[in-house]
Structures are given as C-alpha cells and as structure tokens.
Image (cartoon, grey):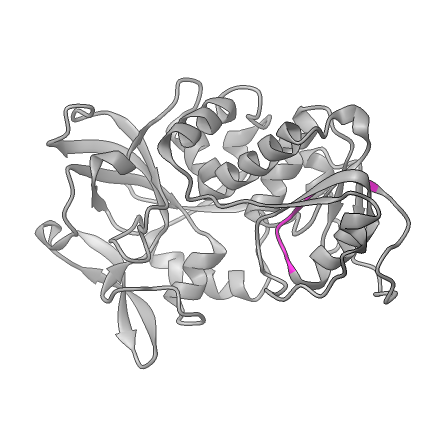
Amino acid sequence: MKAYRIEQDGKLGRGAIVEMEVSALDPGDVTIRTQLAGVNYKDALAGLGRAPIIRRYPCNGGIEAVGAVVESRDARFAPGDRVIVHGRGIGVSHDGGFAEMLRVPGDWVLPLPDGLSALEAATLGVAGYSAALAVDRLETLGVTPESGPVLVSGATGGVGSLAVAMLARRGYAVTALSSKPDDGFLRGLGAQAVIALPEPSGKPLEREQWAGGIDAAGGPVLEWMLATTQAGGVVASIGNAAGIALNTSVLPFILRGVTLTGINADSDMPLRRRIWARLAGDLKPAGLSAMARLIGLADLPGYMDEMLAGRITGRTLVRFDD
C-alpha cells in the first residue's frame, strides 16, 4: 500500500510517499480502508519537519481519516461499516490517515452518523469537529444570536471557515477576521462582515464589540479579541497559528467578566458522539460537500508547502481511490 510516512531526519522528521506492507501498520482491533483524509496545519508542520509534532518515528502522517472497515476483531464494527477516526495520537504517535489503510483500536472508531456522507464527514474532519466544539461551548456558556455579533479569527482556514458557516446557520451575526483579502469566500459562507486585524493600540481594553468569539489564531489576535469582547462575553481559544504567547491583562476578566475558554479537540467518545450528531444535524453547514478541494496523495507534499506559506483557504482532502 502507499503511505505518506514520516521518518526521523535530524532533530525533526520529514515525510515522503512510500510503499509499505499493511502488516507493518501499528496494531489495533479495526483495519480501515481510507477513503478521504483531511489535511490540517498540524499535518503540514509534522510532514515538513517545521515543528516537533511526531512523537515516534517512523509514523504515517494524517491526524484524521474517513473510510470503510475491512477487518475487525471488535464486535461493534463489521466489514463495510463507514467510520471516522481522528485524534487519539494518529498521525503523531500511531500510524495515521495519509495511507491507503489504517489500523486502530476499536475505542478510537466512530460510526459515520446518519445524515452525513463520507465526503461531508471528511470535509468536516478535525477542523469541523473543533469548530463545532467551540460553537457548542459558546452556546453552553450563554451566547445566543440575540447576544450580539460573534467574531471568528483565522476565518479562511479549515476551523475558521467551518465555524463561520456553522454560526451563520445557527442565526448568529458573524464577523470574519482574516489577513487575506476578501474575495467573497467568507461572505459566501455566511459572514456579514470581513475585517483585518487593526494596528495594536496598546490599551488593555478597547470598545466593546463582540458577544462571543472563536479564535483559531492565538497571539496578538486573541489579545485584541479579549480587549474588544463585550461584558459577559465568551471567547473560545482553539489555535495558535499566530503564536502561542498571550500578552494580555486581567482587565477583560475582572472589569467585563469575559470568559476565555479552551477547546481541546481530542475529547472523550461520549462528547464526540454528541458533537458529531450535531454536525449531522443543526450544525451541518449548507453546501458542505462543495466546500473542499480533493487532491491525490502524490500532491500532498507540495500542498503542505502552500499551506504553511498561507496560500490555502478552506478544507482540502486527500482522496484514496479504490
């Protein structure tokens, strides 16, 4: 079978497309033929050796996969079942989704929910699951469409673009924050306004604008979001593309009662089932199956370069033909 396998190359790894035996895959109860695997920023960092992501070499890259079971020693799954796998260390410490076959423990496998095709589920993937977790958290903490506008940063990326689409479907007035020029992509997803990050004022608090926010960037972007969130508002932090440092003050929290909540997409299975049920229902973006571009495994290395250079919008899937 073909796989994008990351070998140790100096301090960090480097990926390449290789031929390998299915028998060489990591152990597990369920063997899956991969149909589609989403490409994430983390995958690109790992595959091109730009960050210490991989915990064990060699390792097939890809932190998610959608496919069909071909063999199972777990009674919950049978050959032909359509399933989703993401997180749990795949593509990092366990062979991942950038391969024609994947083998994992049964406890890591989620049946494809009714209401989602394989293409739709893969288009959502880790990015859509993360976005849905953030939307669900905002709602749990009391943010409603009537509360006021909601800001989404990193809006042209996978998480951000899907968050815009989900919030718009739920009736929120969404403002998209992006460093890329507005070409109609974000408004097509439902954003009512598209803005760029203003020059920093240096003030710990600025004019109140947002009832809630989903931040996929971190760094100075998150700092500005906190300073401009309304009293009682909620900001969900889910990414660090703009940096891991957070230089802020306590004032948004003690003077406005702003809540900063973190989103970890590697959540337990009961929460996964609940969120994926929402993704097949009230959080499913309109036109989902048309939101992703498809590439072949051979295109993956060049695509990763484009992703890290900031020239990619939306979701891209590696397609494995039968």
- The residue furthest front is 254
Q: Is residue 182 above or below residue 111?
A: below
Magenta residues: mostly which secondary structure? strand
The quarter holding residue 113 reads top left
Magenta stretch: includes residue 108:
no
x and y percentages locating residue 103 in the rendered image:
19, 44
Depth check, front residue: 320 or 258? 258
The quarter of the rendered structure image containing the C terminus is top left
Residue 28 lies left or right of residue 92; in this view the side is left
Residue in the picture at 10% in, 32% down = 73
> Is residue 130 in view from this perspective?
yes
Q: Position of residue 257 (x, y in %)?
A: 78, 43
At 59% from the left and 64% from the top, the residue drawn is 244
Q: Mark yes or no: residue 322 visible.
A: no
Q: Quadrant of residue 166?
A: top right
Point 61% across, 51% down: residue: 216
Residue at image point 29% right, 78% down: 9
Q: How many labels were placed on the picture?
A: 0
Q: Quadrant of residue 94?
A: bottom left
Can you name the residue that lies furthest to the right here?
207
Q: Nearer the viewer, residue 178 or 17?
A: 178
Query: What x and y, as percent, mark residue 294?
Result: 44, 44
When the figure is inspected, residue 118 is found, relative to residue 242, above or below; the finding is above
- Which residues lie in the magenta part? 210-218
Is 148 placed left or right of 86 in the picture?
A: right
> Farthest bottom residue?
10
Q: Position of residue 11 (x, y in %)?
A: 34, 79
Is 168 left, or right, of 82 in this rendering?
right
